[in-house]
Image (tube, coloured by chain):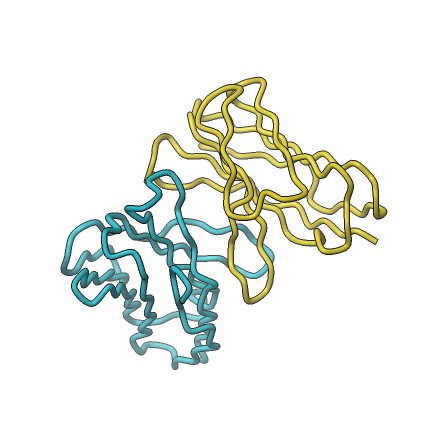
Chain colours: A yellow, B cyan
Amino acid sequence: DVKVTQSSRYLVKRTGEKVFLECVQDMDHENMFWYRQDPGLGLRLIYFSYDVKMKEKGDIPEGYSVSREKKERFSLILESASTNQTSMYLCASSAGWGEKLFFGSGTQLSVL
Amino acid sequence: QKEVEQNSGPLSVPEGAIASLNCTYSDRGSQSFFWYRQYSGKSPELIMFIYSNGDKEDGRFTAQLNKASQYVSLLIRDSQPSDSATYLCAVLPYSSASKIIFGSGTRLSIRP
């Protein structure tokens, strides 16, 4: 069975902290994505990656960076967490462009 | 204008009736269209995808696409309480072949 695993289900951090969100997929997928989901705004794309060490900005990349050193792992980094980054973060992967997205279970991040 | 628009609901439908969920999109050249279901506190899961004009049926679900009107819908026949969830419309726009754009979702409630 396909699996996308996010390292934490809930996280509480302080303003200004550096935050790492980890995502691992076991399907050998080329593409990986980070979304955030906020009430009334749906899913918004932060960053995506189509290959190891390759990354592209999504619609709301400000305040975030990503790392993909291995094909199966895609990390989202909040360089200096702020309260407006409190959100549900969802990682996803797909075998190719326009293909079905497989989502992780999400990380609910609270920045105090 | 949002790229993908949905009525946020909630849409309340009696058990056994047909639930009709609608979505409009702005990029006329969009080629791929998806419906994801998201239960409260869970991550989205794909239930239908459609690429061509017309209807596509899968069990109790039917996706309908009208590219001329830039409109895609999801019909759920014989609605069950287990269908109560938020339904996300997603579109792969021609302008950005790598980024699936999500609507904000329609909350569906099936009343017994």
Q: Where does the image place residue A43, in percent across and percent down from the top left?
A: 51, 54
Q: From the viewer's perspective, tell me whether residue B99 is left or right of residue B56.
A: right
Residue A44, image x and y in percent? 52, 51
Residue A109, given in percent of the width and then of the height, sits at 72, 49
* Residue at x 21% of width, y 49% of height: B51
Q: Residue at x 31, y 78 (%)?
A: B17
Q: Which quadrant would residue B67 be assigned to in this image?
A: bottom left
Residue B5 sits in which quadrant? bottom left
Quadrant of the drawing holding the N terminus of chain A: top left
The correct choice, above or below, for A57 with respect to A35 in the image is above
What is the x, y in percent for residue B82? 45, 65
Q: How many marks?
A: 0
In the rendered image, the vertical position of residue B74 relative to residue A45, given as above or below: below
Please give left or right for residue B7 compared with residue B50 in the image: right
Q: Residue at x 55, y 46 (%)?
A: A35
Instruction: Point out the image quarter for the C terminus of chain A.
Output: bottom right
Q: A63 and A42: which one is in front?
A: A63
Compared to A106, does B25 lie above or below?
A: below
Q: Judge from the rendering whether residue B78 lies leftward or rightward of residue B55; answer left or right.
A: right
The residue located at (39%, 81%) in the rendering is B14
- State the residue in front, B7 or B74: B7
User: Compared with residue B103, is residue A54 higher up or lower down, i.e. above or below?
Assistant: above
